[in-house]
Image: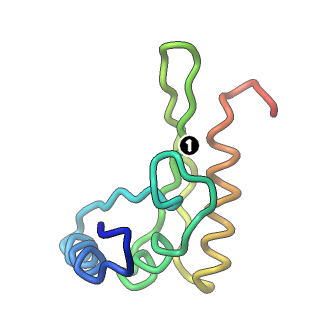
Amino acid sequence: MDRSGNDLGAVRTSLRILKADGTVGIFPQGTRGGGELHGGAALIAAKGRAPILPAGISREGKRWIVRFGAPISPRGGIKSVTAELGVALRELAVPVGRTY
């Protein structure tokens, strides 16, 4: 992904993978450590007609915890799907049994 602008080549490659029933992993924050969500994941899911499977990542000491949520339909508009994804990711990033 070319972060200096819209990387249409990466979008096209992602859509080809989804069309072939493949899986595409995207950090919707733009980076592994970013904060604000971007609409790219929702856009690619909508154009590829593929659900989004949210995954929250957290760490307890030396142990990494990955929790998966329910699939999110890419229908309803890029902003609303991105907002729904953001809620799911915040919930999934908190280890089970903890509150923040």
Identify the image quadrant of residue 6: bottom left
Tell which of 48 and 35 is nearer to you. Answer: 35
Q: Is 80 placed above or below 62 here?
A: below
> In x, y percent, where is residue 56?
56, 43
Left or right, 81 with respect to 42, comes to right
- The residue lying at 31 percent from left, 78 percent from top is 7
Q: Is 33 placed above or below 85 here?
A: above
- The residue lying at 63 percent from left, 61 percent from top is 36
- The residue lying at 65 percent from left, 59 percent from top is 86
> In x, y percent, where is residue 10?
26, 74
Q: Is 63 placed above or below 8 here?
A: above
> In x, y percent, where is residue 84?
67, 66
Q: Which residue is mark 1?
A: 56
Identify the image quadrant of residue 20: bottom left
The three-letter amino acid code for the residue at tag 1 is Gly
Numbered disc 1: secondary structure: strand
Left or right, 42 with respect to 48, comes to right
In the rendered image, the quadrant that contains the C terminus is top right
Tell which of 38 and 21 is nearer to you. Answer: 38
> In x, y percent, where is residue 88?
65, 54
